[in-house]
Amino acid sequence: MGKKFEVVLNAKTCKGCGICTALCPKGVLKIRPDGKAEVAEPAACIGCQSCSLHCPDFCFEIKEVSADD
Amino acid sequence: MEAVYEKYFRDNLPHIWCPGCGNGIVMSALARALDKLGYPQDDILLVSGIGCSSRMSGYMDLNTVHTAHGRALAFATGAKVCEPRLKTFVVMGDGDAAAIGGNHFIHACRRNIDMTAIVINNSIYGMTGGQFSPLTPTGKRATTAPYGSIDRAFNLVDLAKGAGATYVARGDVFHAAQLTNLLVEASRHKGFAVVEAVATCPISFGRYNNIPEPADMLFWLRDNTVTVQQAAKMSDEELTDKIIIGKHFETEAVEYCEEMARLLADKQADNEKAGDENEV
Amino acid sequence: MTEIKNKHVQLMQGNEACALGAIKAGASFFGGYPITPSTEIAEYIAREFPKLGRYFMQMEDEIASIGAMIGASMVGHKAFTATSGPGFSLMQELIGYAAVAEIPLVIIDVMRFGPSTGLPTMPQSGDIMQARWGTHGDHSIIALSPSSVQEAYYTTIRAFNLAEQYRTPVVVLLDEKIGHLREGFDISQDLEPEIINRADFVDKAATSAGGGKYLPFANTPSGVPPFVPLGQGERYHFTGLTHNQAGFYTADAEQVATFMHRLCHKIEDHVNEIAEVEQLDCAGADCVIIAYGAVARSAQEAMVELQSQGYKVGLLRLKTIWPFPAEQIREICADKKLVVMPEMNMGQLAVEAKAALIGSGVPFHSITQVNGRLIAPAPIMQAVIEQMAEHSVKQGGGR
């Protein structure tokens, strides 16, 4: 089993630009009706950091979680 | 919030930049670079000019100065010469650095004073609502180039190299991880380092040039950038409209503050020998 | 061979005296650009600063010069430049920045005949209003004007002291005639001048080191916030945008108004401490000549000659141009029968002097000369005599 990751999204400062959702290679993120991003498939996250690297508003924190917890 | 952000950002977020603005991506790349560099925050001086990108100095928990349009490098020069211990970064927009600030840009390159100049090139004056700049590619539209700019644009990398900068690189906000590494390399380089960070302005440049969606602008960068190594194997014809990213140039040259220190040391020694303490 | 009685006297040029004054004041950064008639100052500093471990830079233009000075001052160095009209014009935007960011710095403006290229080696007190209103927006500023080489030395020291004390740019308005004049210079008998530093006003407890919260733009009673330079443990922010007490952008109407009033009043409320004038025989005089800079020398000679012809004439010399000493002028001149004011311009400062005397009923006569030459004593004498006659002021007669 590959590494597992926790996707922490601070939607408060999200301006709904859509970059994270478009760039995520695994469809982890979705755009809510209000235009902001939300974490739809956390388990699919492979920890590539594309969202946190490209979020202009610093909303993401991708933390590797050890396999057992 | 990521620890690196909490460390390097002040508590006055969210910032004013529009949804999808490339300035935010550069700011996070810079924070990660500072984290890798490991300088104490008290020893970092961040000087910015005027324009969207130059608001960055207000958000970063460093010694920060938000100067006047085009004059950031002049302020930074005076501060660095007097306090060489300060790790100095200068953030400017494309118009800020290459239009009104052009004279200070070429002279800072010529002097080879030890600092990192980050020119965030979104090819537009964003703060004033979307006018073209000296880095706007010919034919691109802006509020003051409604029919497509007839101006030829600078190649900032060539300009910096020609003016004497001893480290010149270009990155972009799609390749954000590479941008961080270029900033680290630029700062570790002793001398005047220029990093052109090609960025995106969806609300002005994007809207006037048919790529209004922030993500589409990033994909455009992904599809239109080639590395320095790739470009070396491509013909000029293949390279038209391509943005060449990576380290373009690095060399060694006398660094201004060190030369100043040598001069002062010599003259003070002569002065003591001559015993003509000049105090009146 | 006659033995030199006073071994301490030197023949010195006004520009050189300014450079010496800057050195004495502790200036440690000079950012400048060559421009007649100021260049001797840069040349002197280029020779002397390295010996003292201080930083001289010739920049790419005057805008870069004042930009570099502001940067140097922000990180703790006393910074200055020397320029003339055309360069002073280029510096105006950043003089406004230095005013709003409350940055101590000194600009020695060796005034030449203008506007534009004008007569680069010839005098005009043409930058008077430019020093006050050259940059846009409400602000206050200090400008001093020496009348001799020796005074240029002390005026420059005072300029640095006022800059440090009031956290403001200070302009030394030096007539070309004084800048290029060579005359005797002997300070060996003088007291050691007081040197003021920004650190003198910092209460350690109000800094983070002292457990306090340092506010770089605090609304202090004196109106001048203590200044801990950047890079000394207080990570704060400078901006040309209107800002709050911590230095960050605000457009809040009340904070902006409070800031603007403090910015102007910190100087305008201390006119009597800042603005220095010198009176020669004004008490009991019928006519007072108001003059400053090089013209004050001709005015003094005219006064002495007029007195020898029985005219009761005094001289009021303005050593400070801004803030304008209106109250002092009113006190000294309100009871006089005539006030004349010779200037090497078309009456730039006469405007202020006239305003100071509004309602006093004192006849005011502005003498102007704009031919690139220093006003000689004769035209001043002639004007006084004519005006005295016109206002039927009998020689030595009572009112």
Image (cartoon, coloured by chain):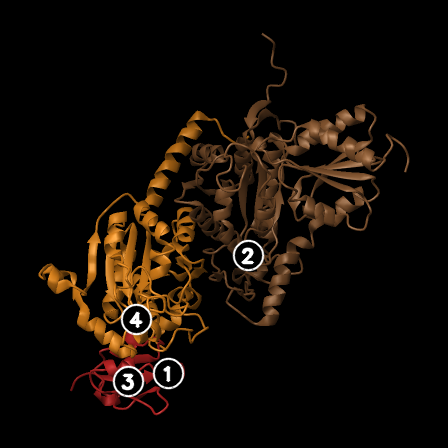
Element type at marker 4? loop
Q: Which chain is orange?
A: B
Residue assigned mark 1: A10
Mark 2 packing: few (<14 Cα in 10 Å), some, or many (20+)?
few
What is the spatial separation of the Cα atoms under label 4 and label 2, in whole angstroms?
34 Å
- The image position of residue B43, as x and y in percent, is 40, 57
- The image position of residue C183, as x and y in percent, is 59, 24
Element type at marker 1? loop
What is the spatial separation of the Cα atoms under label 4 and label 1, in whole angstroms?
23 Å
Residue assigned mark 3: A6
Are the residues under badges 1 and 3 in a single subunit? Answer: yes
Q: Residue furthest front?
A: C390
Q: Quadrant of the N terminus of chain B?
A: bottom left
Front position in the image: B158 or C184: B158
Quarter-wise, where is residue C47 in the image?
top left
- Mark 4 residue type: Thr
- The image position of residue A10, as x and y in percent, is 37, 83
Q: Is residue B193 left or right of residue C295?
A: left
Q: Is residue C212 above or below residue C163?
A: below
Give the numbered dot on residue C136. 2
Mark 1 packing: few (<14 Cα in 10 Å), some, or many (20+)?
some
Are the residues under badges 4 and 1 in a single subunit? Answer: no
Q: Is residue C304 above or below residue B121?
A: above
Nearer the viewer's eye, disc 3 or disc 2? 2
Residue at image position (36%, 72%) is: B5
Mark 2 chain? C
Element type at marker 3? strand
Residue assigned mark 4: B200
Residue C297 in view: yes
Quarter-wise, where is residue C252 in the image?
bottom right
Nearer the viewer's eye, disc 4 or disc 2? 2
What is the spatial separation of the Cα atoms under label 4 and label 3, in whole angstroms?
29 Å
